[in-house]
Image (spheres, helix red, strand yellow):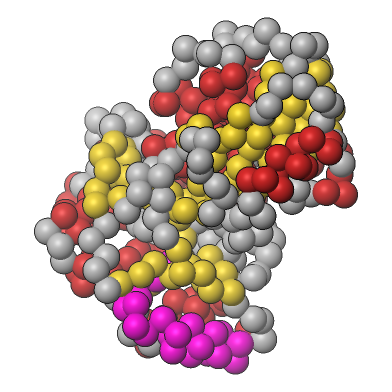
Amino acid sequence: MDMDQLKQTFQEFMDQGEEPKSFFAPGRVNLIGEHTDYNGGNVFPCALSVGTYALARKRNDTKLRLYSLNFPDLGVIEADLHQLKYDKSRDWANYPIGVTEVFQKEGFSLETGFDVVYYGNIPNGAGLSSSASIEILTAVFLKSLFNLPVDMITMVQLAQKAENEFVGVNCGIMDQFAIAAGKKDHAVILDCDSLDYKHVPLKMSGLRLVIANTNKRRGLADSKYNERRQECEKALSLLQKEMDIQALGDVTNEQFEMHSHLIEDPVIRRRAKHAVYENNRTLSAVDLLEKGDMKAFGQLMNESHISLRDDYEVTGTELDALVEAAWREGAIGSRMTGAGFGGCTISIVKEDEIQTFTERVGKAYREVTDIEADFYTVEVGDGAKKMKEEEDIR
Ligand code: NG1
Ligand code: MG
């Protein structure tokens, strides 16, 4: 797919009129800091060079007309600016429609509707946040087409709100943030409570990021995700009996050990331990990276996985098989990424070993699960943006 083909598709599905403008939003992967975002802790994701593209223009009426090359069977989906409701049959289009609705409700009203054609080259269902990508992409073109006075952080918050309240997925803020604020060859350390953030250079000389997809459906992921959130809230309210804290992300490991007796239920205690340790591990990992110690950074990625496996219990046979094989095959670091229960792993691998690495890890994975894994060696790219005339689809 290139920009000319995308433009042709636009002409085919939308009426005659003004030339559309082009926009891009990346996918993302989280390097460390898992299940910390909704605990007011830190995350360390980066934007990818793959992502979602849109050609968009204003209309003269209040209609929204949306088409995605990734879902051609659904055809052009229509909605009206004054009646934006969640509608299951609209499938993927609920994300952009939700963002539009939240913009309207929060006072960034649009004078007209719009036409838009989307195309995404994020590997399908790989857990690289195609939904947040489409949300931020929509926020970016709305801002641009309608000259809305909305800053980056507000866009991130509105996109998260669309996902929480319109689509009904109770996610944290990491995905939308990483996609909006990404920077080429950098990861973003984000405090999900204060929303303070900083770009940290990824010094990857001779190393690459390799994503492996378990190709296992996440199944119970949503209900388990909400269960973990509740367990963490329970732990927080118990710790608050002795501690002046707003979130598990405010607690040091030492403080946790001192006060964890307040949490009698061993399961809840392990959940909280993960949230606290993972947050502090993420801060340590960033320090190590800034010092150029990739090896120690990778070691903390491994510890993160162990904690997600044993204390948070969100991994499962498939993720464990991929990660444990990656450790055996000499990855600098490897862990599950995202919510867990399936989805992807992220590994740091020596560039000249990638071929043997993917072959051997793939084989080991097949032996345990009977499933074929997919591997992607990814590049770290920029955050969402309006594209320049000369830029093409990557
Ligand atoms: P994934 O599974 O990558 O979409 C989910 C949440 C994040 C975060 C991680 C766990 C959604 C859409 N996103 O990520 O906010 O909580 O799990 O670190 O549910
Ligand atoms: Mg905090």
Q: How many marks?
A: 0
**Front residue of 380 and 306:** 380
Residues in magenta, as a range: 345-367
In this picture, residue 114 sits left or right of residue 156: right
Residue at horizontal 26 percent and vertical 39 percent from the top = 198
| Quarter of image, res 241 | top left
The relative height of residue 46 versus residue 11 in the rendered view (above or below) is below
State which quarter of the image contains the N terminus.
Answer: bottom right
Front residue of this view, candidates 118 and 393: 393
Q: Which residue is drawn at the image coordinates 35% and 57% (left, top)?
A: 32
Residue 199 in sight in this render: yes
Q: Quadrant of residue 56?
A: top right
Identify the main secondary structure in magenta.
helix
Q: Is residue 356 magenta?
A: yes
Q: Which of the pair 108/262 is nearer the observer?
A: 108
Residue drawn at x 16%, y 55% is 290
**Above or below, comparing residue 1 to residue 240 in the picture:** below
Does residue 36 appear in the picture of this structure? no
* Image position, residue 141 (x, y; %): 58, 27
Q: Position of residue 73 (x, y in %)?
A: 87, 49
